Image (cartoon, helix red, strand yellow):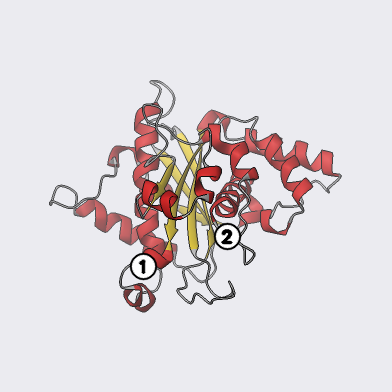
Amino acid sequence: MTSSFVAYIDESGDEGFTFLPDGRGSSHWFVQTAVVYRRPHDLSAVAALKAARATLGWEAKKAFHFCDMRHEQRLVMLNEVIKTPFRTVSILSYKPDIPDPERFQANKWMLYHYLTRLLIERVSWLCRDHMRPGEGDGTVDLIFSDRAAMSYEDIRVYINRLRAQAGMGTQVNIHWPAINMDSLRAVAHAQLAGLQVADAVATSTHYGVKLSRFGIADPSYLALLRRHAYRHRDNFRGYGIKTLTGFEQLQDRMPHLRAAFLNW
């Protein structure tokens, strides 16, 4: 039997910890996002990007790279994408709050792996909550946007290690019956429409929370996507949006975050 869901995973920002006063250096935020489609709706992403290309007058196979696009082009893409049925999960790390950053600097990919764990937890809950009998086997295929320097076999080993620790008093809360480890793979961004959508959602989320060197954030793209965030009992906090630092604490310190998540 085939899987019930497919999750496309991408990130925005970087994992560095060099924060300079003028805003250069490492990004303050690192965001990892999954865009989850039911398997029967997977091709709706292809149709949405095809429609956006037609509006923009782009060639048929031109890939969407959200950060390289102009504002108007981003709006065209997003307004086609939000017509399709999907849910999003984003893990947001405000890196200056991370204690012992030296530990993360000394262990390459440690932050990425940790956010991957939190992301897969919430993707697994989403699949558990929304599984339909007779529509696949209840599992989700995990497809990462390929980062050339990263070993995705290491991610597989990391997740399998978490699974082996299940029931040993750990705080890992992955719903394991939903995770199909055999299907985990990395694919080049340009090859799959779903990865281009994940890139757009991750970057939109990053734009909504990060401040430019002029002290300005842009939540306009994120606002278009708010109805697609995964909710449990109508609550998006801790589900469709998970922050490493407490959400209320961040909002108290950063008033622009209240605007970013207004009317969610």
Q: Earlier in the sequence, mark 1 or mark 2?
A: 1
Q: Position of residue 249 (x, y in %)?
A: 37, 51
The residue lying at 44 percent from left, 24 percent from top is 135
Rendered image: mark on residue 200: none
| 211 relative position to 178: left or right | right
Provide the residue designation for mark 1: 110
Q: Position of residue 173 (x, y in %)?
A: 26, 45
The Cα atoms of the two marked residues, 1 and 2, are separated by: 25 Å
Kind of residue at disc 2: Leu
What kind of element bears circle 2? loop
| 72 relative position to 217: left or right | right
What kind of element bears circle 1? helix
Pick whichever, 59 or 246, lies toward us: 246
Pick whichever, 258 or 233, lies toward us: 258
Q: Quadrant of residue 130?
A: top left
Kind of residue at disc 1: Met
Q: Residue furthest left?
A: 168
The residue lying at 48 percent from left, 54 percent from top is 254
Count the marks: how many? Answer: 2
Q: Quadrant of residue 53?
A: top right
Q: Position of residue 133 (x, y in %)?
A: 38, 20
Rendered image: mark on residue 211: 2
Q: Nearer the viewer, mark 1 or mark 2?
A: 2
Residue 21 in sight in this render: yes
Mark 1 surroundings within 10 Å by alpha-carbon count, few (fewer than 14), some (14 through 19), many (20 or more): some
User: From what the image shows, is residue 217 above or below residue 39?
Assistant: below
